[in-house]
């Protein structure tokens, strides 16, 4: 497996990526990459903390994907979630105190959750009967942007009611608003 799941640090100086099942870091100017994880199971989807000191990632070290964090320079990993299902962190809060992730927990529907990285307490933001993915905090941290529905890989140019849509969830009012729901695929959320 080649390099994948690229993640640029907030200041743009370093790049984290997955290679051969571990998370590696290299200067964005190039040079020698160094692994920051070393485990027989798959470590994937690195995500830099806003201050650049931590990298969150998902790993199937104990069955389903759980969320972990490792110091950006390498060192002991810290397990952040213990659920048997699949969880993938998708964004740090602007202050670096929380992580957003998508999961299905004790419900038939999937949802978006927020994890306090200090206390490891999590809360459900909302659940949805349709697939939700890629939750990201808005720049001011007052809303969450996410995609709804899915991308049918077997129909790359699909257009219609099941095309991936972009939505906004306001954290104060709990109001959900469709930003892009016009039948075309909207694949990336960029707050």
Image (cartoon, grey):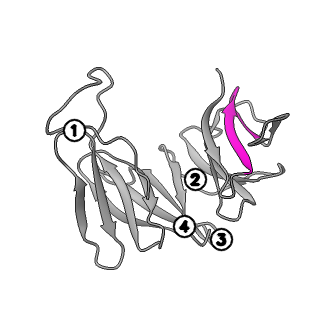
Q: Which residues are magenta?
A: 13-25
Quadrant of the frame with the N terminus: top right
Q: Position of residue 181 (x, y in %)?
A: 19, 49
- Tell me if residue 176 comes above or below residue 25 in the rendering: below
Q: CA distance from mark 1 to mark 2?
A: 37 Å
Q: CA distance from mark 2 to mark 3?
A: 15 Å
Q: Earlier in the sequence, mark 1 or mark 2?
A: 2
The reply, left or right, for residue 97 in relation to residue 113 is right
Q: Residue at x 47, y 73 (%)?
A: 140
Any mark on residue 93, and which? 4
Report if residue 59 is visible in the image.
Answer: no
The reply, left or right, for residue 29 in relation to residue 60 is right
Q: CA distance from mark 3 to mark 1?
A: 40 Å
- Tell me if residue 124 comes above or below residue 47 in the rendering: below
Neighbor class of circle 1 (other Cα within 10 Å; few <14, some 14-19, many 20+) is: some
Q: CA distance from mark 2 to mark 4?
A: 21 Å
Residue 24's image quarter? Answer: top right
Residue behind mark 1: 184
Name the element at disc 4. loop
Q: Position of residue 143 (x, y in %)?
A: 38, 69
Q: Earlier in the sequence, mark 2 or mark 4?
A: 2
**Disc nearest the viewer among 1 and 2:** 1
Q: Residue at x 43, y 59 (%)?
A: 191
Report if residue 99 is visible in the image.
Answer: yes
Q: CA distance from mark 4 to mark 3?
A: 13 Å
Q: Earlier in the sequence, mark 4 or mark 3?
A: 4
């Amino acid at each position: 497996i080649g390099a994948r799941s690229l993640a640029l640090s907030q200041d743009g100086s370093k790049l984290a990526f997955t290679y051969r099942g571990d998370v590696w870091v290299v200067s964005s100017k190039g040079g020698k990459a160094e692994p920051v994880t070393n485990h027989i199971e798959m470590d994937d989807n690195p995500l830099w903390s806003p201050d650049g000191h931590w990298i969150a990632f998902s790993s199937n070290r104990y069955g389903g994907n759980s969320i972990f964090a490792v110091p950006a320079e390498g060192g002991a990993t810290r397990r952040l979630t213990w659920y048997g299902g699949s969880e993938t962190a998708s964004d740090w809060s602007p202050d670096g105190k929380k992580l957003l992730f998508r999961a299905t927990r004790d419900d038939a529907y999937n949802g978006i959750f927020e994890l306090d990285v200090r206390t490891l307490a999590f809360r459900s933001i909302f659940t949805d009967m349709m697939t939700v993915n890629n939750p990201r905090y808005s720049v001011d941290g007052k809303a969450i942007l996410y995609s709804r529905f899915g991308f049918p890989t077997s129909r790359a140019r699909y257009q219609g009611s099941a095309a991936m849509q972009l939505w906004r969830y306001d954290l104060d009012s709990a109001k959900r608003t469709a930003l892009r729901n016009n039948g075309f695929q909207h694949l990336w959320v960029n707050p």
